[in-house]
Amino acid sequence: MKSFKAAAPFALFVLLAFPIIACAQGAAKKEILILNKAEATMVIVDASTLEIVAKVPTGDFPHEVAVSADGKTAYVANYGAQQPNNSISVIDIPSRKEVKRIDLGGFYRPHGIVVADGKVYFTSESSRTVARLDPATEKIDWVMGTGQTATHMLAMTPDNGKIYTANIASNTVTSINLKGPPNPANIKQISVGSQPEAIDISPDGKEVWVGQNGDGKISIIDPATDQVKESISVGKVPIRVKFTPDGKYVLVSDASSGELVVVDAATRKELKRAAVGGVPVGILVQPDGKRAYVALTQLDTVKVFDMDSKEFVKDLKPGDNPDGLGWAAY
């Protein structure tokens, strides 16, 4: 009986404290980031209400966005419209402000972008390179030339050990080993099909999926060997591919048919084709896997896709020419 009395206050503390902890965790902000290319803005959408809460200026013609590990900083690749741009916008998400715009020097047309270990990796189409920016010093501290034409989208393995980038006009994917110095021994060119652009890596790091605009196929690369192990047909122009967080599905934007295609990652079978009413490009899947977002640049729309029903449930109107999408939780 004494032991029960001694334990009771502790048990009561746990019961009372748990809801407080749970509420604190649930209070974290979850926001969708949408880049509007033509108006040079980043729109912030509350993921719970799907309402626009802020619009932040960026550099010219922003294409892709990456978010810091703490969810508070967005790095936007300013690609440039008529004239090539060479900057990355650094946006403080909680304060809704662009805090700096970093000049990249000769690294023009930045596009694909990821954040790893506090550094920002990005492609530069004009210089045919993948480079790394240290946000703290605002300096480029690592560069690897691809030697390929139109080095575009970028993906990194979950262990941050390798980068893969699609080279649209060279019909190749470049594999870069980040565990060694930037020299020829740590780079490999992988031949794929016609006009590769879309690229994503499975959550377990075992497959790289590359969409090919020129032949409607997806090449599946084994990162262990950097060889194409399989090629599947998915629509006509699979301009973007995105794994769901659980790795079960791959979402494909078919720019030719105007559909979002849901593919079973294990069987490679198409499970669903959902018409979008326009040309789908950028895809985002939120971390809990419940919803996906698809940008229709020509219609100034981002469509919300329910992953359970496999249907579109809402249209967002973020601004002029939306494309790149990101997720921020803080």
Image (cartoon, grey):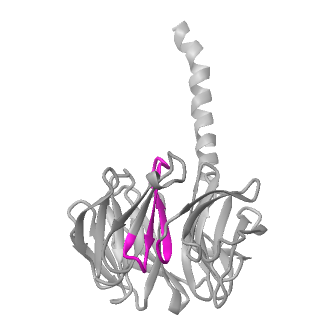
Instruction: State the count of labels.
Output: 0
Asked whether residue 166 is in view, the answer is yes
Q: Residue 52 lies in what quarter of the image?
A: bottom right
Q: Quadrant of the C terminus?
A: bottom right
Residue drawn at (46%, 52%) of the image: 186
In the displayed structure, would residue 129 be above or below residue 184? below
Residue 184, image x, y percentages = 47, 55
Asked if the magenta segment contains residue 326, the reply would be no
Residue 266, image x, y percentages = 24, 59
Residue 283, image x, y percentages = 46, 73
Between 111 and 293, the one lying in front of the other is: 111
In the displayed structure, would residue 299 be above or below residue 249? below
Residue drawn at (49%, 73%) of the image: 151
Asked if the magenta segment contains residue 165, the reply would be yes
Residue 211 lies left or right of residue 63; in this view the side is: left
Residue 291 lies left or right of residue 319; in this view the side is: left
Q: Residue 265 lies in what quarter of the image?
A: bottom left
Residue 294, image x, y percentages = 46, 78
Asked whether residue 329 is in view, the answer is no
| Bounds of the magenta segment | 148-172
